[in-house]
Image: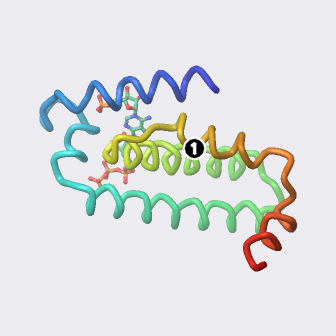
Amino acid sequence: MSDILKQIDAVLEARKADTPESSYVASLYDKGVEKILKKVAEEAAETVMAAKDLQHSNGAKQDQEHLVYEIADLWFHTMVLLASQNLSSNDVTAELQRRFGLSGHDEKASRSE
Ligand SMILES: N=c1c2ncn([C@@H]3O[C@H](COP(=O)(O)OP(=O)(O)OP(=O)(O)O)[C@@H](O)[C@H]3O)c2ncn1[C@@H]1O[C@H](COP(=O)(O)O)[C@@H](O)[C@H]1O
């Protein structure tokens, strides 16, 4: 797994002992899961808008960078959500690993049987 994801997971865990005044992550934990879910929804919507802008500009570099920036915000806030539920990016990468090589069409067919 990417080192930066592991590093962020460690910081997110450590922030559980910090005060809301000293840390953005601790302030999200303090406000509760509803606030974290609101941030995830906001960042998802911002990702969709950035992707649409990129589509309309036919791949302008600035819009590519904007999409990456918004997805980083989205990933980050989903990681905060995972940490708040005593999970981590490791759980998600393990699930992706489990799915690796399994066609999405085949997986869907196996669910409907
Ligand atoms: N990767 C991030 C990261 N990405 C985005 N953000 C913050 O997420 C927020 C994004 O929300 P918005 O743009 O909607 O801004 P906002 O208006 O401040 O948010 P609201 O008041 O609306 O909730 C901003 O405050 C960003 O600074 C992050 N904050 C922290 N990290 C990582 O988490 C670590 C711990 O952060 P602290 O807990 O603040 O020390 C940092 O060292 C970083 O590695």
In the visual, does 70 lie left or right of 30?
A: right
Whether 22 is drawn above or below 53: the answer is: above
Q: Residues within 10 Å of mark 1 (few under 14, many from 20)?
A: few
Question: In the image, is 67 to the left or to the right of 7?
Answer: right
Question: In the displayed structure, does residue 61 sit left or right of residue 78?
Answer: right
Q: Residue at x 17, y 53 (%)?
A: 31
96 in relation to 17, above or below: below
The picture places residue 68, in percent across and down from the top left corner, at 64, 45
Residue where numbered disc 1 is placed: 92
Q: Quadrant of the C terminus?
A: bottom right
Where in the figure is residue 47, as x and y percent of width and height?
Answer: 58, 59
Query: Quick check: which quadrant has ligand 1?
Result: top left
* Total count of labels: 1
* Picture quadrant of residue 95: top right
The residue lying toward the viewer, choosing from 62 and 23, is 23
Residue at 86% over, 68% down: 105
Q: At x 86% / y 65%, what residue is drawn?
A: 106
Query: In the picture, residue 17 is in which quadrant?
Result: top left
Q: Locate residue 97, reporting x and y percent.
A: 71, 40
**Label 1 secondary element:** helix
Image quarter hosting the N terminus: top right
Between 85 and 57, the residue placed more toward the observer is 85
Work out whether residue 105 or residue 49 is closer to the camera in this orientation and state it.
105
Q: How is the image coloured?
A: rainbow
Q: Amino acid at mark 1?
A: Val
Expressed as whole percent of the image width and height from the top left, the position of residue 80 reads: 38, 43
Residue at figure coordinates x 44%, y 65% from the top left: 41
Q: Residue furthest front?
A: 113
